[in-house]
Image (cartoon, grey):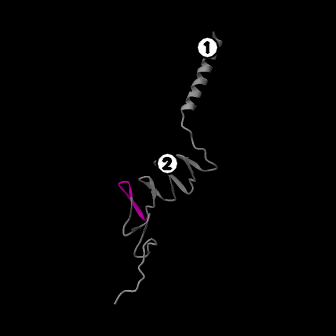
Amino acid sequence: MQRLTLALAVALGAGLALVGTAGASPRKVCRGTDKPCGDECYDPATESCQPGALVCRGAQRACGGQCYDPFYQRCSTGRVECAGSQKPCGNQCYDPATEDCPLEVKDNRPERA
C-alpha cells in the first residue's frame, strides 16, 4: 500500500510539473549580461526596460509606447512634445536660437527689390 501511495504521489507531482511548464509563457533567453524585456534583450549598462516592454537607450523614458529624451522633450498625456523653447523637427526637437532643422527647406532665392 505504501508503494502504491508513493507511486501515485510521484506520478501526480510529475503531472503537475508538466502542466505547469506547458501553460507557462516562454521567457526570452539573452546572452551574457543582457536581460530580457518582453521579446527583446537589452544591455542594462546602456539601456533600460520601460513599462510595456519598451527598450530605451541611456536616460530616455517611455511615453505612449515610444522613447523620448527628457532633456529635450516632455511627455504630455501619452504624447511626446518638445520642451521649453525647443521646436519639433521630424521626430526630434531642436533649439531654433542655436540650431537649424535639417528638414526645413531653405529658400535661397535672392529677394526681389
Residue indicated by mark 2: 53
Relative to 36, does residue 103 appear above or below in the rendering?
Answer: below
Disc 1: CA contacts within 10 A as few (<14), some (14-19) or many (>=20): few
Mark identifier at residue 71 = none
Q: Position of residue 87 (x, y in %)?
A: 39, 68
Residue visible at 60% across and 50% down?
34
Which quarter of the figure has residue 113?
Answer: bottom left
Which of the two residues, 81 or 6, is positioned nearer the viewer here? Answer: 81
Q: What is the count of numbered marks?
A: 2
Q: Indicate which disc, 1 or 2, sits on the residue closer to the N terminus.
A: 1
Q: Nearer the viewer, mark 1 or mark 2?
A: 2
Residue indicated by mark 1: 5
Q: Position of residue 19 (x, y in %)?
A: 56, 28
Residue visible at 40% across and 74% down?
96
Q: What residue span does the magenta drawing correspond to?
A: 71-79
Disc 2: CA contacts within 10 A as few (<14), some (14-19) or many (>=20): some
Horizontal arrangement in the rendering, residue 39 relative to residue 108 (left or right): right
Distance from label 1 to label 2 (Cα)? 46 Å
